[in-house]
């Protein structure tokens, strides 16, 4: 995952006021070791999986506006896709023929 992609994700999450999004932003901050290098695939997988959990929890328990729910729905789908793509790349999942 590119640093610019992470920065954009962080901005989107920071714009939603709930404890779970604060946790997700903290996870991004902890994962970024260099503003100039892409995350390794395993780190990206683990980070996106953790963010996916935070977002899912927010959708379940946080009091959110309708707009914030839409934003988090989109981020949740994005994180799921990134996790599955990383798992395919790492050979943890295999495409059916």
Image (cartoon, rainbow, N blue to C red):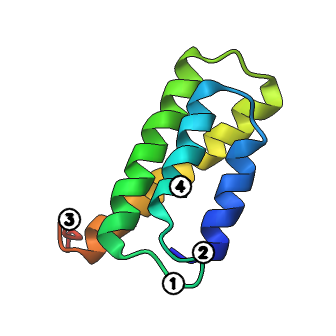
> Dot 3 corresponds to which residue?
93
User: Of callouts 4 and 1, which one flags the residue occurring earlier in the amino acid sequence?
Assistant: 4
Q: Could you tell me which residue is drawn at 62 percent across and 36 percent down?
A: 22
Of callouts 2 and 4, the N-terminal one: 2
The residue that disc 1 covers is 37
> Callout 4: few (<14), some (14-19), or many (20+) C-alpha neighbours within 10 Å?
some
- Label 3 and label 2: CA atoms lie apart by 26 Å
Instruction: Name the disc covering residue 28, or none.
Output: 4
Judging depth in this view, the residue of 57 and 36 nearest the camera is 36
Q: Is residue 19 above or below residue 14?
A: above
Q: Mark 1 to mark 2: distance in Å?
A: 7 Å
Rendered view: 11 above or below 39? above
Q: Earlier in the sequence, mark 1 or mark 2?
A: 2
Give percent across and percent down for residue 57.
49, 26
Residue at image position (74%, 54%) is 11
Disc 2 marks which residue? 3
What's the residue at 35%, 61% (across, down)? 45
């Amino acid at each position: 995952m590119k640093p610019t992609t992470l920065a954009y994700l962080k901005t989107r999450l920071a714009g939603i006021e709930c404890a779970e999004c604060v946790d997700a932003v903290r996870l991004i901050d902890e994962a970024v070791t260099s503003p100039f290098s892409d995350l390794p695939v395993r780190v990206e997988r683990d980070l996106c999986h953790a963010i996916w959990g935070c977002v899912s929890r927010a959708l379940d328990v946080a009091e959110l506006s309708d707009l914030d729910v839409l934003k988090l729905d989109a981020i949740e789908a994005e994180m799921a896709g990134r996790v599955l793509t990383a798992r395919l790349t790492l050979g943890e999942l295999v495409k059916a023929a």
